Image (cartoon, rainbow, N blue to C red):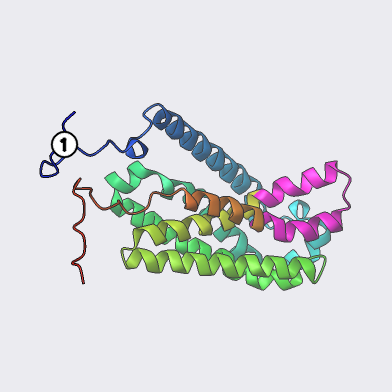
Amino acid sequence: MNAPDPRVPTAAAPDTAAVPDTAAVPKAASARRAGWWTVTALAFLTALFTARYLTLDPEVFLDQQRAVYLAHRGSLVLHVGGGVLAILLGPWQFLPRLRARRPGLHRFVGRLYLLAVLAAGTGGLLMAPRGLVGPVAPIGFTGLAVLLLLSSALAWRAGRRRDILRHRAWAIRSFALIMAAATLRIWLPVMDLAGVPFEQAYAAAAWTCWLINLVVAEHLIARLPGPPPPARTGRVPAAPPAG
């Protein structure tokens, strides 16, 4: 057989790794839709349950915290009102079609979300030192409030700089921290069914309700699409000059 002429360029071998799995695309889209609806339903139920506190009816308050809530109604309304609004608005910020077709609406809802987070976080900082099972639970809830405000501020700054990848990452972290309200209300009944005393479950929940969510958030962030790779020309780079 004749050896190939090195002067004639040969076709590059197809990069099978770069070929998308068309069968996996619909499955991934279905999984994203199911996840979005699940999170949205949890957010709605949490907002519905928590909004009762805005009535300031002592009967709906946690028994162990009733006196504290009644003595600090302003901070309670700030925290609960901001949290309810933020958890209701958050899921809609992650709809690709809304971002693509109505960018102005996306930015408007984002600003409302940031204001709601500011209220929720500030109210949380005011209420946390008066929480139960000190100092473990108060420190945990204080950390939650600080990280919520910080991640939201970083999401806003990245958005202003048009740094879309960082904006999305920090927005996911911010909403994961807001969803700690839902995780908390799942954790406590589960621990009660498991026979864990309330004080132990509450102290643990002050940390696990947001640490678990951040772990999930980091997993989602790691799966975000990055910047497109450089185009391949199929040419072999020239060797460096000898000497």
The answer to whether residue 199 of the structure is visible from this angle is yes
Residue 71 visible somewhere in the drawing = no
Query: Is residue 192 located in the magenta-colored stretch of the structure?
Result: yes
Q: Is residue 207 left or right of residue 200?
A: left
| Quadrant occupied by the C terminus | bottom left
Q: Secondary structure at mark 1?
A: loop
Q: Nearer the viewer, residue 215 or 201?
A: 215
Find residue 123 and report its horizontal and vertical position in percent: 61, 68
Question: Where is residue 104 shown, x and y percent of the image?
Answer: 29, 54
Q: Foreground residue, 227 or 2? A: 2
Q: Main secondary structure of the magenta part?
A: helix
Q: Is residue 94 above or below residue 138?
A: above
Is 95 colored magenta in this rendering? no
x, y percent for residue 40: 53, 42
- Residue drawn at x 26%, y 53% is 230
Residue where numbered disc 1 is placed: 4
The extreme front residue here reads 1
Classify residue 105 as left or right of residue 28. left
Say above or below: 88 vs 28: below
What is the quadrant of the N terminus in the image? top left
What residue sits 47% from the left and 61% below the top?
Answer: 170
**Between 185 and 160, the one nearer to me in the picture:** 160
**Could you tell whether 185 is left or right of 166 in the image?**
right
Most distant residue in the top direction: 23
State how many labels appear.
Answer: 1
Q: Amino acid at mark 1?
A: Pro
Q: What is the crowding at mark 1: few (fewer than 14 residues within 10 Å), some, or many (at least 20)?
A: few
- The percent coordinates of residue 225 (x first, y second) are 39, 49
Q: Residue at x 56, y 54 (%)?
A: 176
Task: Tell me the residue at 67%/70% (across/down).
Answer: 142
Q: Which residues are magenta?
A: 183-210
